[in-house]
Amino acid sequence: MGVFLWLSDLHLDPYYGTENAASHHAGSGGCGPAALPEHPYGRVGCDAPKSLVASALRDAASAAADDPDGAGVDFVLIVGDFARHEVDSLVAADGTADPVEIAGSIFSYCVHTIRSNFPDVPIIPVIGNNDVVPDYYLDTLGGDGNGTGSIIPNLATSGLGDALSAEE
């Protein structure tokens, strides 16, 4: 019988601890600069900082390695929501921030971090509702009608090629 690691809803916010951090709950105390010194691994009402995602994946790899049955992990399944909530709100006032590019970089970072902790294990990533821009909207064709403006090919070319094997 095979063993797999099932991950869901990482909601990585590379902007945690900055003015651009995502905050979901009134009274959470904020996710901006004041949160970082006291809560380096995140806090309730905030999406996850890189430190929390990296720590959780290190611990998962350590637990798999310490499995008394010696089974290890046959594959890693991550069923979406790599990205923070409301990536589309990160458009800079001057229009220089590209939310699709940001979502792609978050997706790529997460897959690379999983790969670094599980180097010889197949990874099966699935795009979630917060991995698309805007949230809950999946444009499979993109603005030009042939898919080049869609997040799907953008995610596929945002660094996943060197994180996933041909079989994955």
Image (cartoon, rainbow, N blue to C red):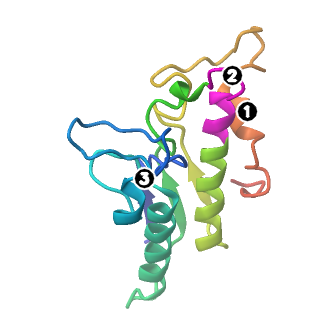
Residue at (58, 55) in percent of width and height: 110
- Name the residue nearer the viewer: 33 or 56: 33
Q: Which residue is mark 1?
A: 154
Residues rendered magenta in the picture? 92-104
- Circle 2 is placed at which residue position? 150
Instruction: Give neighbour class at mark 2: few <14, some 14-19, many 20+ (Cα, 10 Å).
Output: many
Can residue 62 be seen in the rendering of this structure?
A: yes
In which quadrant of the rendered image does the N terminus lie?
bottom left
**Which element carries disc 2, helix, strand or loop?**
loop
Q: Position of residue 118 (x, y in %)?
A: 60, 72
2 with respect to 161 (left or right):
left
As shown in the figure, which amino acid type bears the numbered disc 1? Asn
**Distance (Cα) linking label 3 and label 2:** 25 Å
Q: Secondary structure at mark 1?
A: helix
Q: Residue 40 lies in magenta, yes or no? A: no
Q: Secondary structure at mark 3?
A: loop
Please give the residue where the numbered disc 3 appears in the rendered image: 48
- Circles 3 and 2, Cβ within 8 Å, touching? The answer is no
Mark 1 is surrounded, within 10 Å at the Cα level, by few (under 14), some (14 to 19) or many (20 or more) other residues, namely some
